[in-house]
Image (tube, helix red, strand yellow):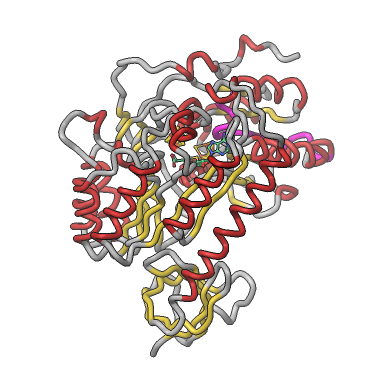
Amino acid sequence: MADPKKYILPSLKEAQKRTQRQVVIERALFELPEETRNLGQGKKYYLRTYGCQANERDSETISGILEAMGFLRVDVPENADLILFNTCAVRKNAEDKVLGEIGHLKGIKKKNPDVVFGLCGCMAQEESIVHELMRAYRHVELIFGTHNIHHLPALLHNVMVKKQKSIEVFSKEGDIIENLPAKRNMKHKAWVNIMYGCDKFCTYCIVPYTRGKERSRTMDDILKEVIELKESGVKEVTLLGQNVNAYGKDLKDGSSFAELLRQVALTGIERIRFMTSHPWDFTDEMIDVIASYDNIMKYIHLPVQSGSTDVLKIMGRRYTREQYKELFDKITARIPECAFSADIIVGFPNETEEQFMETMEMVDYCKYDNVYSFIYSPREGTPAAKMEDNVPLEVKQQRLYALQDKINGYCNMNNQKWVGKTVKVLVDGTSRKNDQVYSGYTEHNKLVNFTGENVQPGEIIDVKITEHRSWTLRGEKVN
Ligand code: SAH
Ligand code: SF4
Ligand code: F3S
């Protein structure tokens, strides 16, 4: 057994804490420690990202750091000197997938003992997972948390040069580290973090423990980033936060999400998206700003989680079914063409058939364009994990299927509406299945596969929709 004293291990108890401690914003220019500067020369890395956009964005920072050290990215783990998994802990099946994959790739280490296996992201923040990795996955020699990304060079030096296992996971509430390098995945679209962490503590959710407390970047830092991105040719930014409505509250300088959104719109960048906005605290001013600027996309991800007020209460969601509908109606009254998506959890502990039917009714009411639906998964350390649960897994599965059937119906119905219309598409590139076909997203976030001539990624072009599928649209470029 490795000596735990050498490591900084995560602590669930610490992760659950919130204090009045002031958030530190670190703005020093990022510099690689002297001894790590050439560590990646001639070496290759493989990075796989699981989970949400926060992780996607973190992976861009991780790539930025590794490439500054000289590493080159490869697409297959077998060709890499460093294999890194940026992980998600939101549901158990997400974790099982990662552990399965790490076990599956163990043979690579046998063939080449110099390969470094690393795990970071939200699973690294879990006390029990890190202990499990130390016990049963000894080939994983590098573990670092969501608050430790900027220490990656030193941790790698420890593994690669000193040949020591490196585990560093801070469970503190978190600071803000500006100016880290980033290797962005796309040239014309970018994620922009506006805040980190979450203080909503929905009773089922692990994110407040893996990501620390809510802390906002300053409006100046965010606007500077958006302007730089725009100048470098980026057409679309997505403002990221676990709950963007909470933006600015911690800064106590009057900053709010509505104001930030307005300022970002005024930069003139062509497309602005944001996620996730919590139905609680979605202000009238936010609705007004979204309605007022053409470059703010009329598509809102508004997770409902359940249609039952009683379940919502036990989930700690802070709104009733009526309040959710009221908000939905208010937005659609002001922005009639607005598209909506949501997240829904079925089979929350003791969910009754009637309560589930209220969720089904909510889907009928909102006719979402898309819903991400999940079976409830107990997460260690959360209040819901301690609740007794009388709903058998089979019943949960049946509810999920019934719900997904309904969701698909509305998705199909909403897609059908677009046939015959001409829409603006931001071109991503060629379709994954056919390189004669291009793909991109409409303003309402519909994926369109289309044909046409002289199409360049990053362009916004008119496409006439000719057909619809369950999840995608088909069309032709309008010349
Ligand atoms: N901050 C976002 C959600 C991030 S997690 C929000 O509040 O909307 C993404 C989604 O995962 C959640 O909306 C929820 O539907 C789902 N989720 C979170 N914890 C879960 C759990 N324990 N079991 C099942 N689904 C869960
Ligand atoms: Fe999780 Fe709720 Fe925070 Fe979303 S708002 S990340 S569901 S605790
Ligand atoms: Fe998963 Fe962490 Fe995001 S738990 S959903 S990767 S914040």
Q: Answer with left or right where residue 50 lies relative to residue 456.
A: right
The quarter of the picture showing ligand 2: top left
Q: Which residue is nearer to you in this view: 355 or 118?
A: 355
Report if residue 30 lies within the magenta region.
no
Q: Answer with left or right where residue 117 lies relative to residue 50.
A: right
Q: Quadrant of the N terminus?
A: top right
Residue 117 found in image quarter: top right
Q: Which residue is nearer to you in this view: 393 or 268?
A: 393
- Which residue is outermost to the front? 354
Picture coordinates of residue 297 (x, y %)?
Answer: 32, 61
Picture coordinates of residue 64 (x, y %)?
Answer: 47, 45
Asked whether residue 33 appears in the rendered view, the answer is no
Picture coordinates of residue 169 (x, y %)?
Answer: 54, 23
Residue at x 60%, y 55% (from the top left corner): 404
Q: In the rendered view, would you say 228 is above or below 41?
A: below
Residue at x 75%, y 26% (from the top left corner): 138
Picture coordinates of residue 249 (x, y %)?
Answer: 24, 32
- Which residue is outermost to the left? 254
Q: Answer with left or right where residue 157 lies relative to residue 337.
A: right
| Magenta region | 111-126
Asked whether residue 246 appears in the rendered view, the answer is yes
Q: Quadrant of the C terminus?
A: bottom left
Q: Which residue is nearer to you in this view: 425 or 83?
A: 425
Residue 437 found in image quarter: bottom right
